[in-house]
Structure formats: C-alpha cells, structure tokens
Amino acid sequence: MKVEKQFSVFLANKPRVLAEVCQELAQARINIRAMSMMDSVEHGVLRIVPGDAAVARKVLQRLGLQVQETDVLCVTLPNRPGAVADLLIRLASANIKLSYAYVTSGAAGGKTIAVLKVNNVAKAQRAMENRKGGARDMTAKLRRPSPLR
C-alpha cells in the first residue's frame, strides 16, 4: 500500500487526443501504472498513476493540458473474487469516505492494484494495517440496512 500521485487530465473528446497524450508519456519513458478514462458531454477525464510523477508532470505541463494532481492510495491485492470487496469493507468499517476507485489487472505476481481516492489517506492506511478480525468479522459489523435497497 502506497500513496501515489494521480493526474486527472481534462481532454477534448476528439479522435487521437488520448493516443497523443499516451504517446508523449511513452516517449518520456513514463510507465502508466494505472489508468482510467471517463467522458462527459464536454470533455473526457483521464486519470493516470504514472511510474515517475515528476517527469509526467513536466510532460503534461509542456502539452498545455488542464491537469489536477491528487494523492491516491494504491493497494496491491490478490487478483481473485472478493479481494476488492474485502478492501472496501475494511474501509467502510473505519468510516472512510470513498470518492472513487478503479482497479488494474495483471500486476506482477498475479496481483491487482486498487486505486482509491479517500477523504483521509492516513486513516485509510491505519485501517488497512489493522488486520484484527478479518473480512468475515468486518462483514458482520456492516450488518445494517443496505443503501442499495
């Protein structure tokens, strides 16, 4: 589990724009460790966690793109059913607010990386380090009416 820099890059919804940004990062030898792309009516938002934040920042500034930097929590998980649920249950049990999350696949050693934007990184780290109980015990703590119903 590490705190990493994530860049939210606002892009025009046009052909080749995303490809050009990724190509510029590649030419600067930046490995994209995690990436998410979403669209809205007016623009797309590219979220990336680069291997080298300082160099990525320079590339994105040179391109003149509107960029927002955020600290995100990157948690390495086993690539198996329930791994993300276990993580989210642990955070929910600690009353951590989750703004958004996305998950990579195929990380080293059959792992995956969850990228989490939380309201309190330090508290989330403590919740993850506290391994008392386990997922089943935490699930029991969450036995409340579901917000989904």
Image: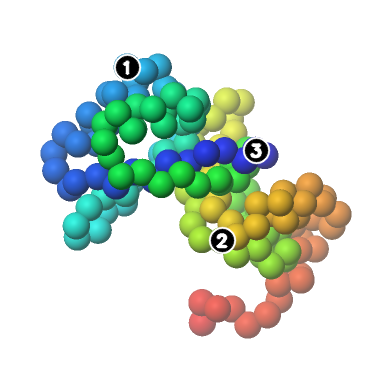
What residue is rendered at 76% in x and 71% in y? 141
Q: Tell me the distance, in whole angstroms, between the alpha carbons under discs 2 and 3.
A: 16 Å
Please name the residue that numbered disc 3 is placed on: 2
Question: Left or right: where does residue 34 sit relative to residue 111?
Answer: left
What residue is rendered at 30% in x and 28% in y? 62
What residue is rendered at 30% in x and 44% in y? 66
Of 16 and 71, nearer the camera is 71
- For the N terminus, the image quarter is top right
Q: Measured from the top left, where is residue 95 in percent x and y?
A: 69, 67
Q: Earlier in the sequence, mark 2 or mark 1?
A: 1
Q: Earlier in the sequence, mark 2 or mark 3?
A: 3
Q: Residues within 10 Å of mark 2 (few under 14, many from 20)?
A: some
Q: Measured from the top left, where is residue 13 in percent x and y?
A: 17, 47
Of 69 and 94, nearer the camera is 69
Amino acid at the residue labelled 1: Gln
Residue 82 in view in this figure: no
Please name the residue that numbered disc 1 is placed on: 27
